[in-house]
């Protein structure tokens, strides 16, 4: 199949990846209500069609923290990407650089921040706060030294949400012999992945935090360790602690509430990502897109406001811009594309988002992405 849309990359990834990894990417927490809402609420927004305007000069670029993006899209931090494609984070970073959009590297990436940075462009770096502050300070200093321009501090995961699919697939909860047999069976039944990732994509550790985790052998061991070591005591005051090591822009990821957005501003952040972690944390919370307008009204003039969650097309990107986002991040869309066929597929997927955004801008009479506003939406729709 030649993929035409994000749902096609999803299908290709479903065929190619072992079930444990496909389900890990695809799933959300509990009954996946929020995961569905993220997509459905974006779909339900009606764009306002406008005609007979000169639409020959489209400008999709936006500037963020002094960095020019070729379009208002970035690759969200996705853990363990190196298990979906050989050295997956390096491939994603290369694809993003080619297209001219940012790639944000997860704390729990398979490739370390040094590996990704030295292979090409230094990524934005996403931070999970672990209990070992000494190690965290070191990690921040490493990201700085690697040249990462922006720190994305994820705050909606003091504990991991319960993900039923991961239990059912054997990704979490199975260890020892049954875990090993499960992994072996998954490999044998997915030969393309076995060749690309299992045999040629090693080491399979969490590169940036491997030093903090004694005696872990598999990525699932690592994830278990990390889940036990998230620091639940974190408050806004800890941003001062982060500042001691990090003097660049800080973006707080995982804000849905306007009050939290104001707190982020007061605490000295430069941006926020309106996000519910792609419906993977507290199931039942509202969709990111429905949370966006109130957050923009609260802090839009003073913070860079980004959105992620449910973005599956260029039409979704324009809807988010119309409601006040500076840019969108996509998570599953690039993880599916990586699983479907590595960097070339991620590039192709980003090309698809770009051409869809171009069509949406043309048919709403929006020449300049930076100037998108609520007038692009059909409020009666
Ligand atoms: C497989 C997977 C792994 C993720 N890992 C991380 C992570 O390590 N750090 C983080 O801040 N967010 C993580 N996220 C959340 C994404 O950054 C983003 O918020 C979410 O995927 C956006 O929703 P979407 O998938 O509908 O685009 C992950 C999401 C997925 C699907």
Image (cartoon, grey):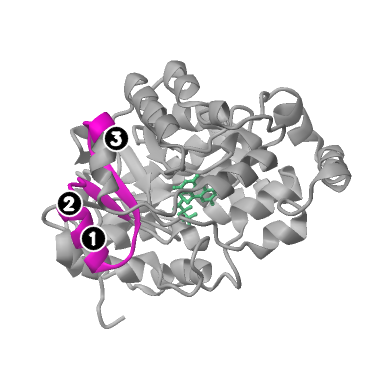
- Residue drawn at the location 67% of the way across and 50% of the way down: 22
> Which tag, 3 or 1, sits closer to the chain's start?
3
Neighbourhood count class around disc 1 (C-alpha, 10 Å): few under 14, some 14–19, many 20 upward:
many
Q: Is residue 86 above or below residue 182?
A: above
Asked if residue 247 lies in the magenta stretch, the reply is yes
The residue lying at 17 percent from left, 68 percent from top is 375
Circle 2 packing at 10 Å, graded few (<14), some (14-19), many (20+), is many
Identified at 49% across, 70% down, the residue is 34
Magenta-highlighted residues: 244-273
State yes or no: discs 3 and 2 in contact (Cβ < 8 Å). Answer: no
Q: Do the residues labelled 3 and 1 touch (CB within 8 Å)?
A: no
Q: Which residue lies furthest to the top in this view?
A: 118
On residue 303, which mark appears? 2
Report, in whole angstroms, how far the alpha carbon at label 3 lies from the one at label 1: 18 Å
CA gap, disc 3 and disc 2: 14 Å
Looking at marks 3 and 2 on the same chain, the residue that comes earlier in the sequence is marked by 3
Q: Which residue lies furthest to the left in this view?
A: 301
Task: Name the side, left or right, on which 39 lies relative to 244.
Answer: right
């Amino acid at each position: 199949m030649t993929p035409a849309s994000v749902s096609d990359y999803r299908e290709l990834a479903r065929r190619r990846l072992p079930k444990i990894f496909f389900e890990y990417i695809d799933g959300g927490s509990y009954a996946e209500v929020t995961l569905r809402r993220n997509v459905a609420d974006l779909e339900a927004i009606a764009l306002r069609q406008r005609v007979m305007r000169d639409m020959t000069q489209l400008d999709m670029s936006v500037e963020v923290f002094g960095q020019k993006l070729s379009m208002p899209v970035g690759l969200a931090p996705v853990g363990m990407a190196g298990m979906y494609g050989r050295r997956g984070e390096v491939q994603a970073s290369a694809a993003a650089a080619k297209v001219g959009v940012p790639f944000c590297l997860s704390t729990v990436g398979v490739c370390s921040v040094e590996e990704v940075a030295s292979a090409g462009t230094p990524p934005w770096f996403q931070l999970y706060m672990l209990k070992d502050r000494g190690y965290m300070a070191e990690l921040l200093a490493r990201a700085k030294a690697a040249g990462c321009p922006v720190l994305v501090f994820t705050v909606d995961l003091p504990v991991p949400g319960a993900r039923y699919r991961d239990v059912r697939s054997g990704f979490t909860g199975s260890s020892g012999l049954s875990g090993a047999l499960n992994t072996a069976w998954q490999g044998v039944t997915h030969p393309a992945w076995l060749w690309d990732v299992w045999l040629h994509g090693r080491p399979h550790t969490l590169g940036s935090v491997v030093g903090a985790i004694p005696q872990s052998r598999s990525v699932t061991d690592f994830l278990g360790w990390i889940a036990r070591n998230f620091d639940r005591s974190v408050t806004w005051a800890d941003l001062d602690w982060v500042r001691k090591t990090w003097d660049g822009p800080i973006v707080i990821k995982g804000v849905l509430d306007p009050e939290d957005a104001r707190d982020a501003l007061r605490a000295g952040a430069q941006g926020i990502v309106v996000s519910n972690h792609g419906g993977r944390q507290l199931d039942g919370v509202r969709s990111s897109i429905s949370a966006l307008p109130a957050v923009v009204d609260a802090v839009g003039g003073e913070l860079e406001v980004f959105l992620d969650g449910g973005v599956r097309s260029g039409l979704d990107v324009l809807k988010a811009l119309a409601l006040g986002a500076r840019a969108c991040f996509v998570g599953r869309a690039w993880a599916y594309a990586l699983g479907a066929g590595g960097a070339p597929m991620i590039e192709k997927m980003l090309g698809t988002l770009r051409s869809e955004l171009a069509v949406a801008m043309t048919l709403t009479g929006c020449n300049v992405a930076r100037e998108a506003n609520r007038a692009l939406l059909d409020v009666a729709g």
